[in-house]
Amino acid sequence: MEFKDYYATLGVPKSASADEIKRAYRKLARQHHPDVNPGDRAAEAKFKEINEANEVLGDTDKRRKYDELGANWRQYEAQAAPNGGAGAGGWAPGAGSYHRTVTPEEFEAMFGGSAGAGDPFSDFFHTFFDSRAGAGRARGGRGRSKQGADLEFQTDLTLDEAFGGTTRRVATRGPSGERSVEIRIPAGIQDGARVRVAGEGTPGAPGGTPGDLYVTVRVLPHPRFERRGADLHVKVSVPLTTAVLGGEVAVPSISGSTLRLKIPELTAWGRVFRLRGHGMPVGVKQDERGDLYATVEIAIPSRLTPDAREHFEALRRLETGTS
């Protein structure tokens, strides 16, 4: 009998924990799901292999038998089943593969429902779901864990929202129907950070506890400011005469105020000035901020008046020592 390396199918080592197996399955199932790859037979076949591997490695008892018996573990399952029929989980004697159809609830939790016009949650999408909990319901409620599944969402923030903090509302679905949960996103949040709301995931089995809700944040690029950690960088246009003779220029800040920056005489293009405490909020108390770095870009005149040309020509004569 052909031996299928389920660990290789999920891309995890044999020593992988249950959580590592679950994460690997979620990632691969979403990547290769037929509804994400319509008409792609290779993706469909891969999806079946992923489900088969998860059905075995995601079940403690089946995983133990697989590890001990290798390719012969299916025959053991078939012999142990009542009336010589399929063993627990849907395996049939002599079957070469296994495919479990994802339930509508699992699919919706994995990929999200379609948001219609006017849906206030259309900028979110449901991502991952605890497939084992769904499989337990599909097998007649024989789930092995009372813990509810975690729910994952993603949202985009502008840099201004990340600076001041904001809120988002997400829709979750449970036995009592859909409900709205408000998520508070703290000021200064980093790109890729996750916000956790305890107990707002999928409800657990009777006597169990619900999972958690996670929102992963993506901070969008800003048209003017570049973020590097807690610091911000901005380019400042400095007139040629100010760069040569010195003076002051206005510098915008993320808070909306205008700062005044003193420019020393003979300031070169690309010189960077540091304005302390005008970057992004840092830390839990939000009373500390990063810095703002202003990079000088010298503005060359787009046209010359006759008087301006005369003065520039006089300057050139001074530089070259010609009369």
Image: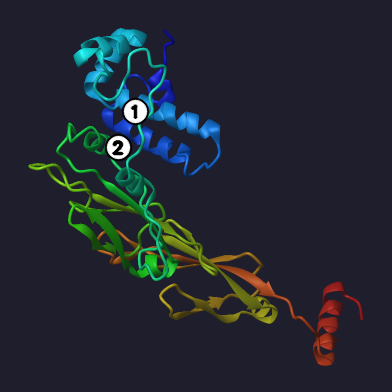
Which amino acid lies under the numbered mark 2 shown in the image of this protein? Ser
Q: 10 Å neighbourhood of mark 2: few (<14), some, or many (≥20)?
A: many
Marks 1 and 2 close (CB-CB < 8 Å): yes
Q: Tell me the quadrant of the picture where the N terminus can be found.
A: top left
Badge 1 is on which residue?
54
Q: Nearer the viewer, residue 171 or 279?
A: 171
Can you give x and y, in whole percent of width and height, for residue 265 in the image?
63, 76
From this view, report whether residue 47 is shown above or below residue 202: above
x and y percent of residue 13 in the render? 37, 21
Please, is residue 289 above or below residue 250 in the view? above
Task: Determine whether, in the image, residue 120 is placed left or right of residue 233.
Answer: left
Sequence-wise first label, 1 or 2: 1
Where is mark 2, residue-wise?
Answer: 131
Residue 160 rendering spot, x and y as whole percentages = 42, 70
Asked which secondary structure carries label 2, the reply is helix
- How crowded is the residue under tag 1: few (<14 C-alpha within 10 Å), some, or many (20+)? many
Q: Is residue 11 visible?
A: no
Q: Residue at x 39, y 71 (%)?
A: 118
State the scheme by which the image is colored: rainbow
| Image location (x, y in percent) of residue 246 | 62, 79
Element assignment for label 1: helix
Residues at marks 1 and 2, CA–CA distance in whole angstroms: 9 Å
| Residue 212 visible from this viewpoint | yes
| Vertical placement of residue 304 versus 2, above or below | below
Q: Could you tell me which residue is drawn at 52 percent across and 41 percent down?
A: 37
